[in-house]
Amino acid sequence: MDLNRRALLSFMSALPVFGAASAVAAQRTPSATEGPYYPSAKMRFSDADNNLVRITGAVRAAGGEVIVLKGRVLDSAGTPLNGARVEIWQCDVNGIYLHTRDRSRGGYDDAFQGFGHVVTGPDGAYAFRTIKPTVYPGRTPHIHVKAFAGGRELTTQFYLADHPLNDRDRIYRRLGAAERELVTMRFVGGPDGPEATVDILLEAGRRYLWTAADWRPSPMSSSASAKKPLVWREVQKPSTSP
Ligand SMILES: [Fe+2]
């Protein structure tokens, strides 16, 4: 296990137990469009773990400012969700997505994984090592996020606190002040660089876009549930608005 993996696992195990269930009972993480660049399975690297700045076998790390994004997946009562799958995807330091259509422009950072996933343990914790999102034409910096957990599914986007382009972003501007707080990354110094904590509050009753079929456990997952023979497999074409 390299240092990055060890650090991530320590983050996940060191996260405090969420104690104020009532504080989040009335809140849900606001959903946002999936956008046109969600990478299908065949577009991803075979390494799709939660360390996006190091691809297995790559000779160098990804370009960009390395950060840690972490938090917990909670249900509408504030209870941590065990076995939740969390995915993130974002453009590389050059503003290019790990997606066939975007990579065709050229210049993609082949050391950047572009997509990653993790499965929560009983404490509901997730963590990713990735890069601080960059600007690309027409959008403020953001990280796309999907979370799936027993009957609940959410697609959203996380933003940089106080970024000057936020207020000009057509998707960010649709959010109310309280909603913005729920998807804002505020960085503090951590043992392994800047880290932001954003909990994901899922809503019951959302439709599945995926089905459990043949999932293999993430090598980064410390979850006992990760040993279950489950795989999230796409069963419905996602939307394509930006
Ligand atoms: Fe995007």
Image (spheres, rainbow, N blue to C red):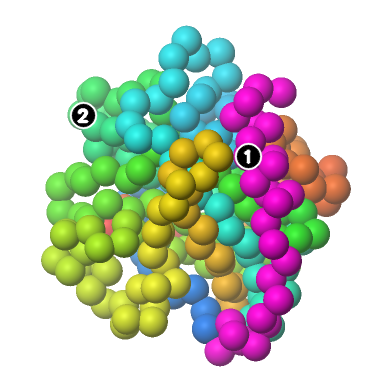
Q: Which residues are magenta?
A: 1-26
Q: Is residue 51 magenta?
A: no
Residue 41 or residue 197, whichever sits in front: 197
Classify residue 81 as left or right of residue 68: right
Query: How many marks on residues?
Result: 2
- Specify whether 182 is left or right of 137: right
Nearer the observer, 229 or 179: 179
Task: Give the percent coordinates (x, y) of residue 111.
Answer: 42, 22
Residue under circle 1? 8
Q: Position of residue 128 (x, y in %)?
A: 55, 44
Is residue 111 among what the camera can see? yes
Q: Earlier in the sequence, mark 1 or mark 2?
A: 1
Which residue is under mark 2? 105
Amino acid carrying label 1: it is: Leu
Among the 4 quarters of the image, the one containing residue 122: bottom right
Q: Is residue 12 magenta?
A: yes
Calculate the distance from the C-alpha at mark 1 to the C-alpha at mark 2.
Answer: 33 Å
Q: Secondary structure at mark 1?
A: helix
Q: Is residue 41 visible?
A: no
